[in-house]
Image (cartoon, helix red, strand yellow):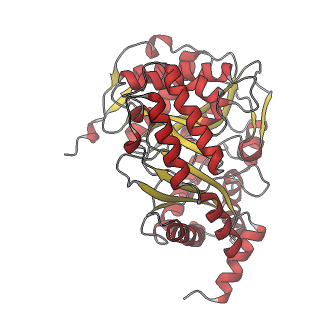
Amino acid sequence: MININEVIETNEMIEKENLDVRTITLGISLLDCIDSNVDKLCDNIYNKICTVAKDLVKTGEDISHEYGIPIVNKRISVTPIAMIGSAACKTTDDYVKIAKTLDKAATEVGVNLLGGYSALVSKGMTPSDELLIRSIPEALKQTNRVCSSVNVGSTKTGIDMDAVRLMGHIVKETAIVTNECDFPGCAKLVVFCNAPDDNPFMAGAFHGVTEKDLVINVGVSGPGVVKTALEKVRGESFEVLCETIKKTAFKVTRVGQLVAKEASKRLNVPFGIVDLSLAPTPAIGDSVADILCEIGLEYAGAPGTTAALALLNDQVKKGGVMASSYVGGLSGAFIPVSEDQGMIDAVNANALSLEKLEAMTCVCSVGLDMIAIPGDTKETTIAGIIADEMAIGMINQKTTAVRLMPAIGKTVGDVVKMGGLFGDAPVMPVNPYSCDAFVNRQGRIPAPIHSFKN
C-alpha cells in the first residue's frame, strides 16, 4: 500500500527536484502503409499517423493535469523508413518527400518530435538504405520535427565500416546544409550500435519490427531527485550510497509505470516499456554531472568519474527493474554535454575532454551525445570517432551512440546556442591526427568472438 508519506515525498520530487516524465512515445508500425507508388505511400503514412495518434497529446495533458505529474514531451516513433520506402523510393528526393509527410503528420497531431527516419545497416546497406542515408541532410533541412538514426553495428554482426565512413560524410553535410536553419540538424541525427527497438527517447527512437502495431513507451527522468537524495547521505559508505540510489530509482520508475499504464488504458494501446534513464536538462539542479559531483568529484571528468558513473548506472537499473516488469529502451544515465549544465561547466573548466567522455560511455546508457566539435573537422575524423564508439558497444554488448554537431564557422571555445531542451554546447577540441587510411578501408569489422552463442 502507498502511504501518505510516500505521496508527500513524490510531490516534493515533482515540485522541488525536477522529477518529470520526459516523454510518452507512441510507437506506430507503418508496414501496412507500404505501396510501390510514393504518393500513395505518403498518403497512407499521413492517414495512419493522424488516425491513431490524434488523441496522444490531449491524453498526455489530461494525465499530467489529473495526477500533477509533468509530462514534458509527447512523441511518435515509426518503423524505420528505409524499410517502408524501399518499394517506392528511387531517388533521395522520394525519401525527402516521405520525411516531409512525417513532419506534416507530426505537426497535425501536435507531437514534439517524430523518430524513425532510420536505416538499420549493421551488416550492410541495401540500395534503399543508402538512398535514405544520403537523403538525411536535405530531409532534416526541410523538416522541423523529424529525427533520424542509423544503426551501423551490433555485437552479433560487427561494424559496417562502409556505413560508418558514409555517416562521417552525412554528419558533416547535415551540419553544412542546416547551418542557416533555426536549429542544427545534427541535434536530430544519431549513429547507433546495438540500437534498441523500444527506445522512447529522441533522436534515436524508431518502432522496431519486433513490436506490435501500436505500443506506448514511456521515458522517465529524475537526476535532480537522485542528487537531492544523495545530499542526505553525504560522506556515508558505498553501501548506503548504492541503497539510496536504488530506492530513489524505484520511486521514479513507479511514477513512469503509473503514467504508462494510464496512457495505455486511455488510448487503448498496449503498454510497452518504461525507460528509466536519468536524462538531464539544461535546468539548474537537473544534471547527471551534479550527481557525480555529489558522489565525491570536484568536476565530472576528474579521476574516478568512470567508476562513479558505473556505480550510478548500475544502481539506477537495479532500482528500476524492481518497479516495473517491463523495463527497456536505454535505461541508465545519459551524459549529453549540451543538455547538462554540469557537463558544460566541466568542459569549460577543462576537466572533461572528448576522450574522457568516450571512456565514460563504456559504463553509461548511450554514448557521445550532443557534443559540438569544430566546424572544420574532417569527415574521416568524424567517422573515426563514430567507429571508436561503435566498437565500445559491439565489444561490451551494450547500446552506444554518437550525436556530434560540427559547428560550421566555429572553433574551440565558441558556443553553439540552441536553447530549450537541447541547451548550449561549448565547442570541444578533437584529436588532430589522421585516421584516413583506417576509415577508408572497405568492408566491415567482424563480430567479436563472444557473439557466437547459438
For the C terminus, the image quarter is top left
Query: In the picture provided, is 272 more to the left or to the right than 342?
Result: left
Q: Where 74 falls versus 188 (above or below)?
A: below
Q: Position of residue 433 (x, y in %)?
A: 58, 15
Residue 262: quarter of image:
bottom right
Residue 247: quarter of image:
bottom right
Q: Position of residue 83 (x, y in %)?
A: 39, 34
The image shows a total of numbered marks equal to 0
Residue 355, can we see it? yes
Residue at 73% in and 37% down:
347
Residue at 64% in and 70% down:
63
Q: Nearer the viewer, residue 116 or 241?
A: 116
Q: Nearer the viewer, residue 64 or 168?
A: 64
Residue 303, can we see it? no
For the N terminus, the image quarter is bottom right
Residue at 60% in and 23% down:
138
Q: Position of residue 346 (x, y in %)?
A: 74, 42
Q: Position of residue 238 (x, y in %)?
A: 57, 66
